[in-house]
Amino acid sequence: MKKIITVLMVLLAASAFVFANGQQDAAGSSSVELSFAGNYAFGGSTTVEPIVRAAAESFQEMYPLVKISYDAPGSSAGVKGALAGTYSIGAASRSLKSSEIEAGAIPYAVAKDGVAVVLNKGTVPMDNMALKDVIAIYAGEITNWKALGGPDAEIVVYNRDEASGTRSCFKDATVKTQKKSFTENAAIVTSNGDMVSKVGSTPYAIGYCGFGYIGKDAGTKAVTVNKIPPTPANVLNASYAVARELILITKGDLVAGSLEEAFINYIMSEEGQEIVAEEKFIPINS
Amino acid sequence: MKSSKSFMESTVEKVFLFSALLSVISVFFITVFIFKEGLPLFKVVNPLEFLFSSKWSPTGEPPQFGILPFMMGSIWVTVGALIISVPIALAVGIFMAEMANEKMAELLRSVVALLAGIPSVIYGLFGYIAISPIVRRVFGSPSGLGVLTASIVLAIMTLPIIISITEVSLRAVPHELKEASLALGATHWMTIYRVMIPSSRSGILAGIVLGMGRAIGETMAVLMVAGNAVTMPKGPLSLTRTLTMNIATDMKYAADDHSVSLFTTGIVLFIFILGINMLVQYLSKKAVNKES
């Protein structure tokens, strides 16, 4: 019995030592400039996810001791997480609400993006949708493709959950412009990736996603809206209907020499903005 | 030597007692926590409005918290699941207890146990990939998601519980009863549905109610196949969102009153489950009393 107790005591002491050591490491590294270490949790928008993931990958190559994770529950969760301290950097695909700015959220615009309207490729023949028809579908006024000159089939409307920044941008640019609200009879999906794959696999479906997700599912096609194709050029010249800025968020100002500062600077750098373009989003300064 | 033995004995006893207390304490703390987090909502929202309004718009201006659509959603999918699973489960249970030979029953038992062990997310995937296209084609539901698809998935998930409890209850029926019935000239089937089933009724009902608890509490699988639309279910092909889905969908971003309202939704779910559990306990007690 005594032996067991001794062993336990030794283990306890050893573990205390290990933990204390770990803490010292973390404290030591943040004081040394340009060498970061430790685990960092980022999270938020599913639209911004490809940018942050790709940027984090090259960032981790520069600082091999850094591990960055990205969790994608939606823009509102990104802002909430950044404010609560769960995420050291949050990401959102919509602008901040005044209540969020009051709570101390600071946005850094890192890219521009549009929201594309996507249809099920195999069953819906349209290649163009008038914005007013998109609004009528999402307000629940048109429920059959026949009304738009398509096949006689009920329209399967996919919408995003309320955490989504893409949803809030799409709402502002569509139903809200006519003081209408979204139809209740829409199936809710919780990410851009989920959206394109569900629209691709459900006959007669309509949905919407960030430009970065166009073409990610073979069964989904993006259509022109009011004959304007969803391309970066059309977002930049403001002819495309649904556009927005993608932001990263921290709580309070960036601390000089912090990893958060280095990461945001990296995304804003030429190399970072190349990643933005590679992921099919629009560099912020173009 | 003897003292160390009794020391061991008492240590083991204390460890076990502690474990037992731990589970009681967990239940206690979970209950207190949910109520503490959820009840403050009623300072802002009238309880009647919360329970019986069908307007859920937590981020609207002004926000509205009515969970009736979700309660109805939970009830729709649960009842739907039971309508599908109970006849099948009873048939399988009776077959295993009364008709199958021991080898067959053993095989079925392990398959049922396997069915019970499949993670719910797999059921969800299966429902989305396999069941929703069938529902789309056969019933003409445009999206293939909704009450019916969720009910089918939940029915498969509740099968193992109802089957195994039905089998056990039937096997617990005293032999004398069965033998008496057969001796009076009743056929095997007559004996089953006039003697065996009535005398194991409480046990079977407890199994069904337990299955109901599983169906109402299931989150992941229904999240993938019910469509998650905030709407009052209007029929078996309607999209729906259950209480559990509402908590799971909104929790990640909810703030302030909205976040509180999810705990309040949790309270409602908790009361549902509590009621179901009490019913199970009552029924199983009845079943035990009858046996003795």
Image (cartoon, rainbow, N blue to C red):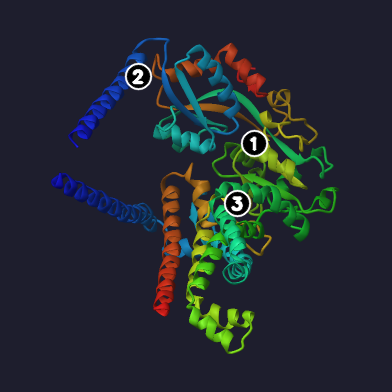
Residue at figure coordinates x 84%, y 53% from the top left:
A152
Tell me the CA gap for discs 2 and 1: 35 Å
Residue type at mark 3? Asn
Q: What x and y, as percent, mark residue B91?
A: 62, 69
Task: Give the CA separation, mark 2 to mark 3.
Answer: 43 Å
To which residue does mark 2 refer? A26
Dot 1 amino acid type: Gly
Q: Nearer the viewer, residue B283 or A87?
A: B283
* Amino acid type, mark 2: Ala
| Label 3: chain letter | B
Residue A121 percent coordinates (x, y): 80, 40
Can the viewer see residue A179 in this picture? no
Residue A60 image offset from top left, x and y in percent: 51, 17
Which quadrant of the structure image shows residue A170?
top right
State the residue at coordinates (61%, 53%): B229
Residue B247 to residue A283: above or below: below
Q: Earlier in the sequence, mark 2 or mark 1?
A: 2
